[in-house]
Amino acid sequence: MWSGLPLFPEQASTVASQVDNLYFFLVALTLVFSVLIAGLMVFFAVKFRARNTAQVGAPITGSVPLELLWSIVPFGISMVIFAWGATVFFTIARPPDETINIYAVGKRWMWKFQHIDGQREINELHVPVGRPVKVTITSEDVIHDLYFPAFRVKADAIPGRYSTVWFNATRPGEYHLFCAEYCGTQHSGMTGKVVVMEPAAYQSWLSGGVGEMSLAARGQRTFQDLACHTCHMEDASGRGPSLVNLFGSQVKLADGRVVTADEAYLRESTLNPQARLVAGYQPLMPTFQGLVNEEGLMGLIEYIKSLQSAQNAR
Amino acid sequence: MTTPLLPREHYLNIRYGIASWLLTKDHKRIALLYLIGITVFFVLGGAFAVLIRLELATPAGDMVSADTYNKLFTMHGVVMVFFFLIPSIPAVLGNFLVPMMIGARDLAFPKLNLISWYIYMLGGIFTLWAVVVGGVDTGWTFYTPYSTAASNTNVVATGLGVFITGFSSILTGLNFIVTIHRMRAPGLTWFRLPLFIWAHYATSLIQVLGTPVIAITVLLLALERTFRIGIFDPALGGDPVLFQHLFWFYSHPAVYIMILPSMGVVSEVVACFSRKTVFGYSFVAFSSLAIAVFGFLVWAHHMFVAGMSVYAAMVFSFLSFAVAIPSAVKVFNWTATLYKGAIWWQAPLLFVFGFIGLFTIGGMTGLFLAALGLDVHVHDTYFVVAHFHYIMVGGAIMGYMAGLHFWWPKMFGRMYPEGWAKFAALVVFVGFNLTFFPQFVVGYLGMPRRYHVYPEEFQVLNVMSSAGASILGVGYLIPMVYFIWSLRYGKVAGPNPWGATGLEWTTQSPPLTENFTVTPVVNEGAYEYSKRETRVV
């Protein structure tokens, strides 16, 4: 009957073993302390059992050395766990420089994924084995959370914000993909699978699409449909700043601040253009709230990312 | 030794009739009013839990609909947290015992105490009304923008219930603080106070300082939901994560509102049944205050995967490890108290043993969650559910059960049946572990919490959990039966059946309305068992 009793999840990413090592350490530590406390408790309770109800205990009131010992030693141990946990966290929080970028939008109750090459999928995510994948996530409605147990990572999908999660899958196969933040009726149905493929199979999957244009090309089309290009001219002669080489650069704002033009900045400047207005430009741009959805915004961002002049191309 | 007789006159028989209870200013009678109120809510919250576990016995959502399931876990959480756990020990045992332990005739503000109970009941009725007219499905955490923009259930009514009940909590805390400062018997210095009083003092500080924050938060939520004023919903220009900051700024310290009074009970019971003073009295006392203070600085550890900066996450992780130390110190001191004691195996001590064991596991698994890299995986899974049930059910409720057994003879003048009580302690311990231990495993496997339907490979562990819950339920029903039985048929207890120290045991059981006919004078520490010849009456 125990064959139906799993005790431990599959390890299918590079960080999984790091997370699990910390877990094993803590399980062992919990075992040691629980057995120590429970053992002493039972031992004392049996050994010093009262023989009659009039008997009293020894006049012991305490011991400062002992108090120091059992304050300092647990504190020291907890600092080891703290440092260990923080180290693993930095690995999880900081994606490598070169990643495959995928965009995800959570929506009650489905996950929509967009690949740079143009493939779109719902509740299924295809990734290659052995290459770091970064997923940029947001939500169209309430807070969700994209969770890959086999990779030991998750991140909240927060409306109005971008968050990222990255992993490097180590074993081909199909694994669970869950929504981990409660989001209403079909929360437990907002699940799917992540399919980890051998590189060759992944390449043929990528090219096996139905001839979709790339995400950046879709963004370019949106850019033209919304007439963004009439102001944001490439040679900076328009009423808005040129967007060439914008992504990742330092932008000087009208109020004197300097910000990095990252995904969140581009998103905000599309939906709420006057929030962080670029220095030297008039607050003329209208909001595009309601005219472009979260997936469309991701296309726009990918298009702006692709606008790199020759000497600046990454 | 002759069998003691019930005193001729006491707080229970001094007056009869509904009005004598509903208009009472006696802290002991108000404690019993609370006892009735929280027991009703405990049964209700327990019934929701039963339905949740029945549904989860199979992977498919085959017993109730998804919406019903979501309402069940929400109402289980709301009822248990706000209407049972937070008021449980302070409002029942604290109300009864704080004045008696410090040699006072009542709390500082008896009328305020009665009003607190009415406010609590009003909040409870509001919430019950919300349940009856269709329930609420946001989870007890009320996360935005789901709660303000998406849910079409009775969020505002439930929130108002929580808002109203919060005032009861604030006023009770205020009453305790003033009482402990101003009404101690002559000679009862701070370091002669029972540790139960220290624990309640620390709890009261959190109640007074923390509860206004949840009140404001719930109010803002109601404003956004009702009038579409943008505070939390990004579609209205708000920030959903702001809600989480405000919510947890109260709700993490609220965990300590639930567990600190229980720790106070443990100190009293361990000392009494070891016939020894609590090892490291001042360390145990100050650790309560340390928990109350540091408890306010760790709230954001509930939000490690909500996109906070890695440096902020490190600060909150560090502080979360720091807050674990005072709890660990308490556990070590209780264990050391047993050393060379004269251990008297009575039911309250068995419940306390359960507390110490389960709280240790609950506390240790808290370290898993404070460790950043590990929290990313287990956050929002059943691992978290198991962890906080070890603290709240294994800790807080075990302590409440221990306290209820320990002071039952004082409250009603009669003994509960000892054999049944020991049996109940065992059943609760076994049922509890079978219910919640598998949830650690299934959580690490990756099963998210609040799932109505789940993958088949998680079924065996969920069936274990559901089976355990039925045992746990029986474990709680047994005391309910024998407690009621004992009111009439229990052996008459006499003033001090445990031979315990403490001013409450110097009075008759049940006590007079004014507690003490002569104001007691204190000239020694709280637990001088080894100095005195133990009287067993």
Image (spheres, coloured by chain):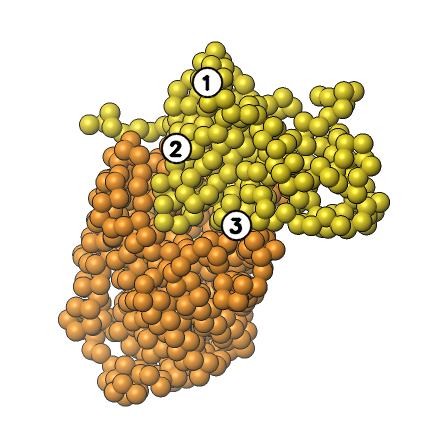
Chain colours: A yellow, B orange
How far separated are the C-alphas under marks 2 and 1? 21 Å
| B472 versus A247 height, above or below | below
Q: Which residue is mark 3?
A: B326
Q: In this orientation, which residue lies closer to the viewer: A46 or A117?
A: A117
Front in this rendered view, residue A86 or A104: A104
Q: Quadrant of the C terminus of chain B?
A: bottom left
What residue did someone put label 2 on?
A192
Q: Which residue is mark 1?
A: A208
Q: Quadrant of residue B459?
A: top left
Let me know if marks 3 and 2 both belong to one chain: no
Residue A77 position, x and y percent, is: 54, 35
A6 over B281 or under it: above or below: above
Q: In the rendered structure, which amino acid carries the disc numbered 2?
A: Gly
> Which chain does the numbered disc 2 sit on?
A
Kindly identify which numbered label has been placed on residue B98: none
Task: Please give the chain letter of the residue carrying mark 1.
Answer: A
Q: Secondary structure at mark 2?
A: strand
Q: Does residue A94 appear left or right of residue B359 in this picture?
A: right
Does any portion of residue B218 appear in the rendered image? no
Chain letter for the residue marked with disc 3 in the picture: B
Q: Residue at x 41, y 36 (%)?
A: A178
Q: Is residue A139 left or right of residue A258?
A: left
| Mark 2 surroundings within 10 Å by alpha-carbon count, few (fewer than 14), some (14 through 19), many (20 or more) | some
The numbered mark, 2 or 1, whose residue comes first in the sequence reads 2
